[in-house]
Amino acid sequence: MKNFADNLVRKIAELDNPTVIGLDPKLDYIPEYIREYAEQLFPEEAAKATAKAIWLFNKEIIDLTCDIVPALKLQYAYYEMYGVEAIKTMLLTTRYAQKKGMLVIADCKRNDIGSTATAYAEAVLGNTDILLGENMEMSGFDCCTVNCYLGIDGVKPFIDVAKRDGKGIFCLVRTSNPSAGDFQDQELADGKKLYEIVAGKVSVWGEELIGEEGFSSVGAVVGATWPEQAVELRKLMPRTFMLIPGYGAQGAGADAAVAGFTADGKGGIVNSSRAIMTAWKARGMDPKDFGKAARLEALDMKENLNGALKNRKYV
Amino acid sequence: MKNFADNLVRKIAELDNPTVIGLDPKLDYIPEYIREYAEQLFPEEAAKATAKAIWLFNKEIIDLTCDIVPALKLQYAYYEMYGVEAIKTMLLTTRYAQKKGMLVIADCKRNDIGSTATAYAEAVLGNTDILLGENMEMSGFDCCTVNCYLGIDGVKPFIDVAKRDGKGIFCLVRTSNPSAGDFQDQELADGKKLYEIVAGKVSVWGEELIGEEGFSSVGAVVGATWPEQAVELRKLMPRTFMLIPGYGAQGAGADAAVAGFTADGKGGIVNSSRAIMTAWKARGMDPKDFGKAARLEALDMKENLNGALKNRKYV
């Protein structure tokens, strides 16, 4: 049976790289020569030109990293912001990256009550019956992020679709942002923090989707910016695969990023978005070499993470 | 200065109706004659036929309720599920309803960290610079729902856009679903429940957006299914406008639905989706009269809510 966590664990092992590249294509990140070319292609259609520029940018980064990076994370907001044409580009990017062998995660943080959660799960991971007797796969992502504030009946529909179609989810447990603690750190009557309660539930919810490699396709988002908490969370979620944002531009180093990995260095994947997309700027490289720069950055990140996994600072 | 809460309060007063209609157009809800007509229009394009059927359904309900109902709530998931063409229909529905005088709420429950929350806020409520020097209004909703699990830096971008553009948000405080309590009811060290802490924050966050009518454009989602809690929440959020789901199909009656309204019967709007959309079935009416049935249902709902507001059961 297809299991997302198994695919992810094996792909990471094959490439010896626990990295996911985030493609959050703000236009500012895209080199000017690509933007100008896209404008020339669609001089009267700004929305199409914008979507084309994003596509050319994404494609080059995928082409130059797909043999060294196991997964891609697309941040839904940045496509939605640029309109329907950009949403089409997001779907095109997903299919293209999958063809190139990458697993693709929708970072959409979806959440809603039962029947509507089912609609989201089918939209992002599954499929839907439409008219003329056809069935549509709207997005076809391999995995998506889910916000659990509504409790289990907002999450179960995602788990059901994940189980049926061999997909995965990452539940927000401890996010990487400065105000994550506003609610997540609230101390409960029994002395636990809220995010620990969420972690406990995520661990239980995931039991039925543990694959042959020992990890569940019901994963958790655990920010790299809170390494001590990540260590504790690993104890609460021994079989939970962790998606770890916050490395690089958000401030966390490699030591912190791998804090939640298991003792044998598994069970996590670390995201980098901005640092990969804008590597050509930081490295002072020619804009036309932005793909090469992304590759160099990804290779450095791989080395840093694997180095940190050999000498664990947070355990 | 344009203030969403003022517009909403005044529109409700003008029509004497604290109701919002939810258009969550599952194909099952759409009468067969419309589906068949749409299939005839696009016999080779199932996605376009599907989007067309949704549009014809939505338009008829708007046409037959816009003079009696102040607002429309579009559930993002049901459009996303049917693909990009259906997302276009969602945007078309928004603009059409606004032209007809309705305020339109995106029920999207968006959430993310700072910069990405900004992208969502601009996508749903605001606008974005794109190529060729153009600026795009992606959606143009008047208001949207927001999940606050990430704390203030995931919410402030929405508040900033709302302030700048005269838009509004409804923060999830106490949702209407059965498992809402999984996390929202967690008892904290100081004896309060988590949702009360969220409510307190929402009230404070909204202070800068209180309009002339006395309510803030930073509102709250408070499920009709928890009337005792709604009464308590009103005390914690005296100036917060409440979006109240859970009436009708989800089980709450009019008495429960108005529990969170202020003592003078203001500050809330009650949603009904399925019962309005499928009124023609429940009333045994001709499918071609689904719009009339929706209107009758909306009028009944108005009468029920106003009746409940005259004789408050929960105070």
Image: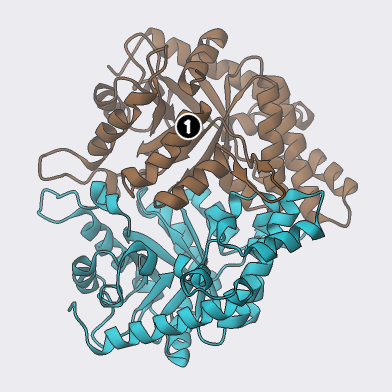
Chain colours: A cyan, B brown
Give how far across and how far down residue B47 sits, in percent: 77, 54
Left/right placement of residue A274 relative to residue A181 reads right
Dot 1 alpha-carbon crowd within 10 angstroms: few under 14, some 14 to 19, many 20 or more: many
Front one among B26 and A27:
A27
Question: In which quadrant is the C terminus of chain B drawn?
Answer: top left
As drawn, A9 above or below B220:
below
> Is residue A308 among the parts visible in the rendering?
yes
Q: Amino acid at mark 1?
A: Ala
In percent of width and height, residue A208 lies at 38, 73
Residue B77, above or below A263:
above
Q: Which residue is mark 1?
A: B162
- Give residue A27's quadrant in the image: bottom right
Quick one: SS at disc 1?
helix
Image mark count: 1
At which x and y percent is residue B280?
Answer: 68, 29
- Horizontally, residue B304 falls left or right of residue A131, namely left
Point 76% across, 56% down: residue: A39
- Residue beneath the point at 40% across and 12% down: B309
Nearer to us in this view, B307 or B216? B216
Horizontal side of residue A133 vs B276, given as left or right: right
In screen coordinates, is A52 left or right of B275?
right
Q: Nearer the viewer, residue B92 or A192?
A: B92
Is any part of residue B284 visible from this angle?
no
Chain letter of the residue beneath label 1 in the structure image? B
- Residue at x 25%, y 46% (from the top left corner): A182
Q: Position of residue B22 (x, y in %)?
A: 57, 33
Q: Indicate the quadrant where residue B299 lies.
A: top right
Q: Residue at x 24, y 43 (%)?
A: B185
